[in-house]
Image: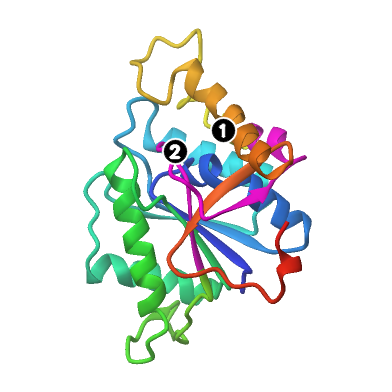
Amino acid sequence: MKLDILAFGAHPDDVELGCAGTILKEISLGKTVGIIDLTRGELGTRGSAEIRNQEANAAAKILGVSARENLEMRDGFFVNDEKHQLEIIKMIRKYQPEIVLCNAIDDRHIDHEKGSKLVSDACFLSGLMKIETTSEGEKQTAWRPKLVYHYIQWKNIEPDFVVDITGFTDKKIESILAYGSQFYDANSNEPESPITSKNFLESLNYRSRDLGRLIGVDHAEGFTVERYLAVNSLADLM
């Protein structure tokens, strides 16, 4: 199945938190999108890997993505080596995306930075014909995405560009709240973590509103790039 966009997250819910609004908008424009979770989030303070799996499936339905897979790498301990790169390469060649979205290049959680570099490196290597991979017993064709963008997560990294997601924020929050085990719950007796506070949940709205304010719209999501952005005409910019 060829997809237009493939979004990677180190943990289930990374994609929803970082770029769900953009995914929703692109799907509304007719693009096909898939999500690949690197780990099951088994080291999370709350919930369990099994619960996170159920939540990820529910979030995928809300977003309307065409595919979602989990590579079951070790939460907290996966590394950027040949073994893990090949796992990513197989996904890139399987879905042949034009655009890849992945974790922030610098963030509070060590897996986010690791996941960002791992996916970025694999995107390049996936285009090398002499790296051979197979899927379901068949040799895969080399494929390199045209663009790799990094969504913004915990840290307020200055974006290289922002996407107007006005009209998609409510659905984005709905997909995030599908992870009921992970976020603010006044009745929960489980331990607190940086993402379980009411302030964190509210920050999702005020961050998108602030980014939107800066470009003259209601809501926006920010991304960073690895190479210069290019446009055909000045009129391509808002």
Determine whether 191 is above or below 22 in the image.
Answer: above
The span shown in magenta is 148-174
Q: Amino acid at mark 1?
A: Arg
Confirm whether residue 94 shows in the render: yes
Indicate the position of residue 226 as horizontal and vertical percent values: 43, 66
130 over 102 or under it: above or below: below
Residue 156 numbered mark, or none: 2
- x and y, in percent, of residue 23 in the image: 64, 52
The residue that appears at 77% across and 54% down in the rendered structure is 28
Q: Are marks 1 and 2 in contact (CB under 8 Å)?
A: yes
Is 91 in front, or is 165?
165
- Read off the residue under disc 1: 207
Query: Residue 167 magenta-drawn?
Result: yes
Q: Nearer the viewer, residue 202 or 81?
A: 202
Secondary element at tag 2 = loop
- Crowd rating for badge 2 (residues with CA inside 10 Å; few <14, some 14–19, many 20+): few
| 30 vs 46, nearest the viewer | 30
Q: Quadrant of the C terminus?
A: bottom right
